[in-house]
Image (cartoon, rainbow, N blue to C red):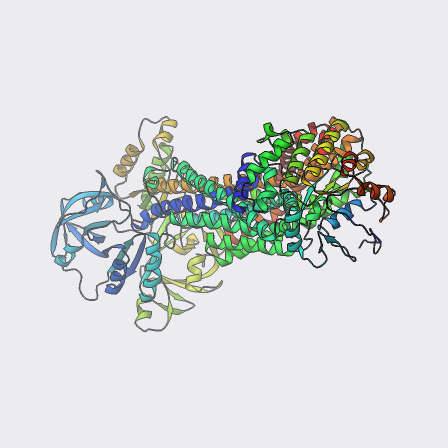
Amino acid sequence: MELQLAWRLFKRELMQGQLLLIVLAITLAVLSVSGLARVSERLQVAINGEAANFIAADRIIDSPVELDTNVLELAESLDIAHVTNMTFNSMVYAGDNFQLVTIKAVADGYPLRGEIELSSGVTQALPKTGEAWYENRLGGLLGYPTTLELGNTELNLSAEISRLPDAGFNPFASSPVLLMRLDDVATTGIIQPGSRVNYIYQFAGEAAALTEFETQAKPLLNNSQRWTDVQSGDSPIASAVKRAERFLLLASLLGIALACAAIGIAAQRYCQRHYDVVAMLKTFGASSKQIRTLFGIHLMLVTLVGIVLGLIGGLLLDLGINQFLPAEIAAYSPPYSRPLLLGVSTGLISAFMFSAYPLMRLLAIPPLRVLQRQLEGLQFGMWLHLLLSLCAMALLGYLYSRSIALTMTVVLAVLLLGVLLSILGFAMIRLGHSVGMKTTNPLQLALAGLRRRARQNAVQLVGFSSALVLLLTILALRQDLLNEWQKQLPEDAPNYFLVNIAPEDTKPLNDFLDSNKIIATDIYPVIRGRLTHINDEELISRREEKDGIEGRVGISRELNLTYRETLPPNNEITSGTFNQADDEVSVEAEVAERLGLSLNDTMTFNIDNQSFSVKVTSFRQVQWETLQPNFFMIFKPKALEPFSYTSMASFHLNDEDLKANGSDLTANAVVLQLIQQFPTISVIDVGAMVGQLRQIIEQVSLSLSLVLALVLLASALVLIAQTEAGMATRQRELAVLRTFGASGWLLRSATGLEFALLGAIAGILAVIVAEFALYMLKTQVFELVVYMHWPWWGISPLAGAAVVAFLGMWRCRQLLNQSCSDLLKAG
Amino acid sequence: MTQEGELTILNGIYMDVKQGDSIAILGPSGSGKSTLLGLLAALDTPTSGEILLDGQALSGLNEEQKAALRKQKVSFIFQSFMLVDTLTALENVMLPAELAGVANAREKAENMLERVGLSHRLTHLPKQLSGGEQQRVAIARAFICEPKVLFADEPTGNLDSANGDKIADMLFALNQESDTTLVLVTHDLELAKRCKRQLVMDNGHLSEPNAEQSTTEHNTTKAANEEAC
């Protein structure tokens, strides 16, 4: 019987729109979670995939010795594809010319991610046995030979490489790359025991398998073996991806918290609406069990509809977003299981935990309410409601983020926000206490209304302002992140690097660039030198440390040193003062930390067999992702001028810019001219990589906008639910005022003003709290520049007033147009 | 309990209502009429004293047992109708029968609605019905389980006099047909006069001004009774 009754009640209420709010709230929570889980998983894969192109794999293990077979067996058992490559330096000879090159010996399967670009186009193939492919620079250096000698063997040069997927981003790489087959290495006879080679093991597979692989494989590695993934490498997008991930997670969690708030308010309203029904059922003799079962089933049906709609919505959201994604990402379909499971559990947890207390109150309604309408049963236990709601939020947050720390932070922040807003809201409403209770002026009537419902309004205020705070926070963060990325990769980001610029070429090169109206970065002199001592202590290499030699570990390779009078753009001093005297050096902060440097330490360098010492006087933060020439060590000109140097520079050039400057040439033609005019200068084209970076940022921006839209929806729902919650008392008051002759105009104006005032106060509170929240988030989580959002101080209260007044008036429109007797009957 | 201390609403009340009786409880607002109705109908519990309903003492019963008792023996009509506004007229009437596990609830409800002249309004929602029609639905709902006692709280209080008269006619007619005991709380003297007995509540005390006369009438003929009601 209860099932039948519950179904009937549910069917009728659903058709009459009575359940709209709670169903919508559950739908939104489920939609957000399931949709976002899937979309962000897809975007994550896309972002990582793009990023993986920078390392030609998903994970890499670098090792000076061959890797233990059990690591490779582990990868195979987890269905992870792997390929073994080797790199080493060697001399190659072409007739009378010789050149030091970096040999990259690869096996079938390379590259696991990304593609090799040849000057003739993209290829899926590898050099055949006895063949090698050369980097375009090498051709110029050796005079474009058809064969070259490497150790005991001769290799045919069969193709010119434009870009290797794991070329990385190192314009200093002084030796050009030669790509050959790993099987051919043995015939060269170059690799002997003790030769310095680097084995590169590349891995690619499903995300879950990779995580498992990482957990199991990492402990098997020794100190000399380095684990790299797309985020740990020097990939210029690492920090962009990390920030985007943090933002997505945070925004989704806040979105879920908002949707939960909407469910909480809607559940309360849902239960209040049934007070009379329960009283009536009890009067007609329904037992507690019957009522419990009836409403249990009823709520379950409501939840079920919310979940189903939410899952469909999530799916549509995913499909909709897919339309905007590049085909290869859209083609990737992450498994449905996680979003589905997350969606269903979100619906169940939020519906039942947020409804638990309102439901307890509903079931405790005494039958006597049929005669005494003011009776409401349970008058205690708000703390239980709060506790259950926070638990639900924590549980959902954890399910979604799988991070206890992040979940606790969000829950505590929400709690703090609630308490803070309650106190502020209550205080602000009480401020208007001295105003009289005249009913001729709409403003006074509105103020009186605010005061009369101070407690209820304070609760509404918390709802309104929480929604606004979260919205403002997400809006500002999204904008800041986008601006930040835009700043790093402006339209005119350098796409060409010039290295090996001889001192005598500097002036003619500048003239060439000027004549073509190309604006280059400053030209940086580059001097290669080795760091030998810190504070007179001789440094050892990692390899020596591994062999048991004791000492302070330094940097085993040669460094690119530069000098200039001023701090370069995009560099920021983190401590100390930039070089004042000739014997001072400014060190990049991360390398300083790795070397254990302190200010005033002495560093000794060796250049061309000459040693000299300088004092560390500043540490600098460098934005590696800006694609500008960046250096670990910067000296005063006097310190390095005695040494021979070459220079480097970067510039931006494309066909459109040239056309705009009135040139008929294409970018390629200009670069060709440059190469012909300056044959010793190496030109590195990083345009493809910049394009790739842009694509990643566009995808991330899309996901940020999507999350913003969902948070906006959740906020709107909270606002609507909150407006709905105060309707019953408002109706009674309107009835009384109407009866005593208040005109329609007065009531409409007063109601509109009351909502507008409430919205404006919520707007002010929201902007205060949002500025504070943004300060915390920017300094603690996102490492962004903090600034005040002054326009918000005007816009937020105005927008709050407009939106809340509109929602309130829209919801009250029927009440305001009803006749006095109708109002009284309904009330 | 109130902020000012203990408040006595009803005091020293003794009354005896016989099966098939119809009694009206009259009195000014705040005199305790509705409180008495709540106690008699096992919706509320007195702080002291004893109430017997169909021979069963209410004081020993817990809420569940009281609910079970109401289900078997009691029904209600309210001033504000108390219909479930999302259910149709038919579904509202079926409700008590379904709660009591009556097998042919739908058939009985249709029959009841026909008796109150609403067979053409079965699928209408309360808000699509006039006040008089809503109270007729409430009457149909009250009689569907053939209760032993029917409690009515100002059944015509929300209606104009023409509709109020119709409702009263219907109420008394059905009451008589079903041999139900009727306990009616009202301000309306005319309505009260149609009951066999009239009790007056004043400041928590109950009196029966026409006790002798009504008892005599009660003990005379059934025909006379019918006339009085």
Count how many numbered circles sit on residues in the image.
0
The image quarter containing residue A742 is: top right
Q: Could you tell me if residue A576 is visible in this image?
A: no
Q: Residue at x 67, y 33 (%)?
A: B136
Residue B152 on image: x %, y %: 73, 41
Instruction: Return the residue nearer the eye: A750 or A330.
Output: A750
Q: Could you tell me if residue A674 is visible in this image?
A: yes
Residue B66 on image: x %, y %: 67, 53
Instruction: Return the residue nearer the eye: B61 or A244.
Output: B61
Residue A773 on image: x %, y %: 58, 49
In the rendered view, does B15 fall on the left or right side of A135? right
In the rendered view, does B102 fall on the left or right side of A455? left
In the rendered view, does A608 fall on the left or right side of A755? left
The image quarter containing residue A803 is: top right
Instruction: Return the residue nearer the eye: A353 or B32.
Output: B32
In the rendered view, does B72 fall on the left or right side of A539? right
Say above or below: B98 vs A604: above
Q: Quadrant of the C terminus of chain A?
A: top right
Residue A335 on image: x %, y %: 36, 47
Instruction: Return the residue nearer the eye: A359 or A496.
Output: A359
